[in-house]
Amino acid sequence: ELDSVTFLLLSPCESTSHGFSSATCNRYGPQVGADRSKTASPFEWNRDKPYKIMKIGIFLPNWIGDCCMAIPTLRALKQSFPKDTKWLGIARPGPKAFLEEQPWIDQWLVYRSRSQGPLLNRRTLVRRLRQERCDALLLLTNSFGSALLAALTGSPRPIGYGRDGRSWLLTERLVTPQENGSYKPIPAIDYYLQIARYLGCDTENRRMELQTSPQYLAQADQLWQELGFRKQIPTVLIN
């Protein structure tokens, strides 16, 4: 069941530097399965002791619909970690434009895999992430390529789902449930929230939300007038 997660230590080692404790720090563990409701958070901190301000990078989904489904996870992370934690969004231009008005990301790195222009490409993205020195990289993506990029940055804690041959690239990996040899269909909201739950976040709130700016609202009003739509009549948008 994916309602909760198990914390299985494959090669335990403990670190308590900067007031944080980590259950494991090596490239091959831990693997996460079914129930960790009684397990301490891998990012547990002691609020009575000084701690290092953390910077955590998030590889965001590539599709707008998936970004919508990831919003409860971004909110849970932002609200559960210390307020001075810095959140670095790693995204393609579309998802960045979609999420930049939301309060969950503090800084952005925007890239295209083969960019020849002002945007970062895979090589320059790795270089920038090395400079950022993130304490962890969370992968809300399933691709082997994103896990490889995270590993190449030298991040001490690339965390995500261990699937599609990329488990060995992650220091901490969640198991995707399978059924009859295939991945079991899981609501995307719950799929992403498992990562936040694994990190000890409160994940009760599954509600999606979007905030927008007065500029975008004005543009929407103008578009409605140009199309001849009336605000008194509901409009259905199909993506």
Image (cartoon, rainbow, N blue to C red):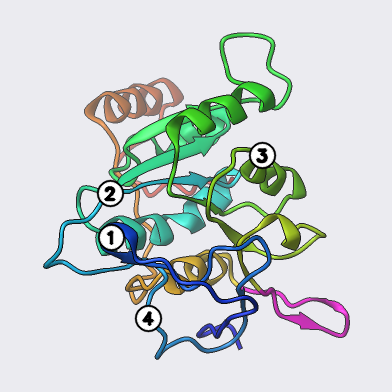
From the image, tell me which residue sits under label 1: 81
Q: Residues within 10 Å of mark 1 (few under 14, many from 20)?
A: some
Which residue is the site of mark 3?
Answer: 152
Q: In the rendered image, which quarter contains the N terminus?
A: bottom right
On residue 40, which mark appears? 4
Tell me the residue that label 2 is attached to.
Answer: 85
Closer to the chain start, of discs 2 and 4, is 4
Q: Considering only order in the chain, which callout, 1 or 3, is on the residue closer to the N terminus? A: 1
Q: Quadrant of residue 123?
A: top right
Cα separation, mark 2 vs mark 1, equals 7 Å
Between the C-alphas of marks 3 and 2, the distance is 23 Å
Query: Furthest-top residue in view?
Result: 117
For the residues bearing labels 2 and 1, Cβ distance under 8 angstroms: yes
The answer to whether mark 3 and mark 1 are in CB contact below 8 A is no
Regarding mark 3 in the picture, which secondary structure is present there? helix
- Kindly identify the residue that appears in the image at 71 percent across and 44 percent down: 148
Q: Is the magenta stretch mostly helix, strand or loop?
A: loop
- Nearer to us of marks 1 and 4 is 4
The mark closer to the camera, 3 or 2, is 3
Q: Which residue is drawn at 32% across and 64% down?
A: 20
- Above or below residue 226? Residue 41 is below
136 within the magenta span: no
Earlier residue among tags 3 and 4: 4
Going by the numbered disc 3, the residue's amino acid type is Leu
Structural crowding at the residue carrying mark 3, measured as other residues with C-alpha within 10 Å and reported as few (<14), some (14–19) or many (≥20): some
